[in-house]
């Protein structure tokens, strides 16, 4: 299927008029979308039916979007792996960083263009579909880390890693280029499906999450920062500066 056709989306926002607009627009664009207006209803909806992704507002009364996200991350299996796009207040970088650190795949500032929202959703779905279609690819194993693209599974010393779709895509790109620096603009385009801008910290936050999940801090992690260039997955004997992907 295409990146939109038949995809089931759950929108969680207490702004009912906005929900009506988004539901109408995305339905015409090929999405199957439902809306709820508070955190409790969102958790109940996720447990009752399978959704391909969620649009989650941060600022809601009672249970905030961050609260909802934290609870989803504790759910078993595919529920915790559901991609989530968070809607944040324009200019509120703290909400964006907290959302990404908690487990969101991407964010969009409100008020936002409905066309841009649809484009972000398609990018997330393309990433998810790309992983699902990679059954022909061999698994990658470097040091203690193994990545199985076909099963969308990554392990550290045999223990499963709980990764978001964005984190999985970034880790795959870094491992495929092990020992070579992958520029931020390439990671942003290939993993997140959009162009890199100088003030976009999404890749940095996702890299920080991966470092924590791989069990190392910024000084010890197998994911290294090459200042002014990008990131690399360390391989024995690799020169991180001499080899940079175009």
Image (cartoon, rainbow, N blue to C red):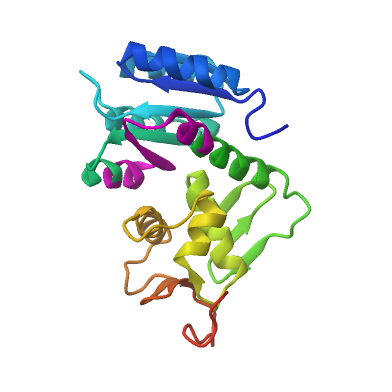
Nearer to the camera, 50 or 228: 228
At horizontal 31% and vertical 57% (from top left) the residue drawn is 199
At horizontal 28% and vertical 47% (from top left) the residue drawn is 97
Compared to 49, does 241 lie above or below? below
Compared to 157, does 90 lie above or below? above
Which quarter of the rendered picture does the C terminus lie within?
A: bottom right
Nearer to the camera, 31 or 47: 31
Q: Is residue 107 in the magenta section?
A: yes
At horizontal 42% and vertical 35% (from top left) the residue drawn is 85
Q: Residue 186's spot in the image, x, y percent?
A: 52, 63
For the question of whether residue 10 can be seen, the reply is yes
Q: Residue 112's spot in the image, x, y percent?
A: 37, 32
Horizontal side of 86 relative to 237 (left or right) equals left
Nearer to the camera, 56 or 143: 56
Q: Is residue 113 in the magenta section?
A: yes
Which quarter of the rendered picture does the N terminus lie within?
A: top right
- Picture quadrant where residue 5 is located: top right
For the question of whether residue 160 can be seen, the reply is no
Q: Residue 197's spot in the image, x, y percent?
A: 39, 57
Compared to 71, does 172 lie above or below? below
Q: How many marks?
A: 0
Horizontal side of 144 relative to 19 (left or right) equals right
List the single residue furthest toward the right.
Answer: 136
Q: Residue 120's spot in the image, x, y percent?
A: 49, 38
**Residue interval drawn in magenta:** 97-119
């Amino acid at each position: 299927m295409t990146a939109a056709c038949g995809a089931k989306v759950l929108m969680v926002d207490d702004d009912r008029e906005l929900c009506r607009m988004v539901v109408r627009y995305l339905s015409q664009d090929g999405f199957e979308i439902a809306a709820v207006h508070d955190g409790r209803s969102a958790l109940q909806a996720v447990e009752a039916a399978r959704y391909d992704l969620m649009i989650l507002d941060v600022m809601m009364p009672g249970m905030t979007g961050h609260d909802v996200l934290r609870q989803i991350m504790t759910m078993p299996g595919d529920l915790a792996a559901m991609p989530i796009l968070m809607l944040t207040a324009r200019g509120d970088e703290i909400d964006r960083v907290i959302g990404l650190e908690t487990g969101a795949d991407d964010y969009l500032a409100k008020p936002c263009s409905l066309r841009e929202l649809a484009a972000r959703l398609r990018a997330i779905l393309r990433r998810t579909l790309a992983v699902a279609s990679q059954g022909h690819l061999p698994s990658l194993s470097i040091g203690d880390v193994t990545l199985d693209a076909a099963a969308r599974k990554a392990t550290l010393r045999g223990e499963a890693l709980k990764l978001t779709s964005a984190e999985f895509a970034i880790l795959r790109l870094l491992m495929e280029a092990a020992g070579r620096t992958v520029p931020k603009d390439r990671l942003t385009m290939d993993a997140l499906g959009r162009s890199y801008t100088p003030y976009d910290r999404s890749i940095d936050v996702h890299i920080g999450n991966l470092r924590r999940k791989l069990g190392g801090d910024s000084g010890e992690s197998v994911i290294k920062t090459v200042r002014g260039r990008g990131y690399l997955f360390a391989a024995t004997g690799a020169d991180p500066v001499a080899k940079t992907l175009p």
